[in-house]
Image: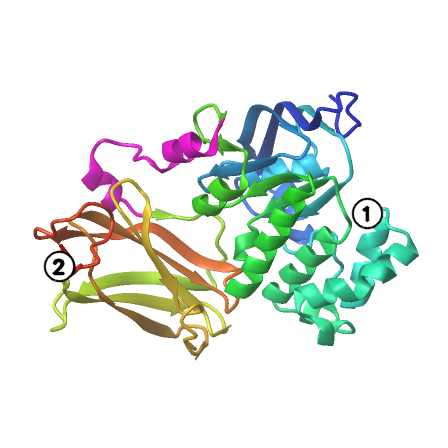
Amino acid sequence: MSLLKKDKKEEFAVTVENVSKRFKIPHEKRSTLFENITGILEGKKYSYEEFCVLKNISFKVKKGETLGIIGENGTGKSTLLKIIAGVLKPDNGSVIVNGKIAPFLELGVGFQPELRAEDNVRLYGAVMGMNKKEIEDKFEDIFEFAELERFKNVKLKNFSSGMYARLAFSTAISTDPDVLLIDEVLAVGDLNFQQKCLNKINEFKKNKKTILFVSHDTESIKKISNSVLLLNKEKSPLLGVPDIIIKKYLQPKDNNIEKIISSKKRASTITLKGEIAGIEILDDNGNEIKEIEFGQKINIICKLKFNTQVINPVVGIIIRDKDGKESYNTNTLWNNIYTGDYSKGDSAEIAFECSNYLNTGTYSITIGLTDSTATEVYDWYDNFASFEVIGNTKSIGTANLNSNVRVVQR
């Protein structure tokens, strides 16, 4: 089994051949030495089951191209990037990389929480092969891009998750890599910073850098990528042009639309510092409804409970049509709403007041709960609730703009 090595075929920046990765999941948790010794004395065998995240994954990325990687939670997208970066070793297969890699993976992979921000930047640059002059030349630009000029002397353990991520991304792109690995850059910071990240990615594309880009934002994947890799839990991966692969990813997995829309699915990568306890769709009179008339005002009530102290959590909703395409997406962060501070055992209700201009059809509501920077996901449910839009809207598409049509000249 070969791992990271230089590729003699200059045409390809990244070559992945038959890569597989399995993790061992213990049946019981033993976190202390006492528990381990007690288990041995009691004759309890340490048993586990194997979970296969990646199985025989193969693809090649040409120099200067961008590969978007999509798939449901738990399909191994982040694991694949870690293997390419050399953070994890594959159980089988090989990874060949031609050029210098800069990974932006989990929050600050390689950063040391006990060190100050400026020390981490210098250490990361040295690890990535930059000399002292190169690091100092880019030092101020790194903190300016991350919008953290005032926090150079602060230890990273005192950073919020959003600050941590901004510094990690800014440091990674400063190393002038040949291959850039990005995991969910659109979860970093506010909308303005996310746009800065996308602008920087486009700048890398223009400079013929190779990019591997993981995201749940299919529109950004479509705009940025030359090709898309779709990872599936039980099927072989699909590789092809963005429009076709994304369409396959978004299309319903079952012909029974009602079954798809109404089946809740909880994300696997959540911290549960807060939980989504329920959702209600109410009319103006406070009555719960399943059918909504065009133009009708509705209230989407998100019920929450908290398992630890939480400050200003972000609550968001996504409304999708029967094909899984986003019709509407908003959250409290984008609307500059301070949602409050909560302690363990507290509960809350957040209301989204909407006027319905969706066309007739079946829609689902996805709901998410995160920290104040929308970086750490506390809880997330796809298809938590569903509703029908009824009435003759006399238009085609997702939304009806209720046009006033008239002849102005003849």
The reply, left or right, for residue 50 in relation to residue 283 is right
Residue at point 25% right, 49% down? 398
Choose top left, top right, bottom left or bottom right for residue 165.
bottom right
Residue tagged 2: 406
- 348, above or below 172, in the image: below
Query: Looking at numbered disc 2 in the image, what kind of residue is underneath it?
Result: Arg
- Distance (Cα) linking label 1 and label 2: 63 Å
Question: How far from the left and from the top, in percent, is residue 145?
Answer: 68, 64
- 45, above or below 410, in the image: above
Residue at point 73% right, 37% down? 86
Query: Looking at numbered disc 1 in the image, what kind of residue is underneath it?
Result: Met
Q: How dense is the environment of label 2, judged by Cα within 10 Å: few (below 14), some, or many (20 and up)?
A: few
Which quadrant, please, contains the C terminus?
bottom left
- Does any portion of residue 249 appear in the rendered image? yes
Residues in magenta, as a range: 240-264
Residue tagged 1: 128
Check disc 1 and report its element: helix, strand or loop.
Answer: loop
The verdict on residue 256 being magenta is: yes
Work out which residue is located at the far front of the displayed protein and give it.
410
- Does any portion of residue 41 appear in the rendered image? no
Residue at point 66% right, 53% down? 32
Please tell me which residue lies in front, 173 or 314.
Answer: 173
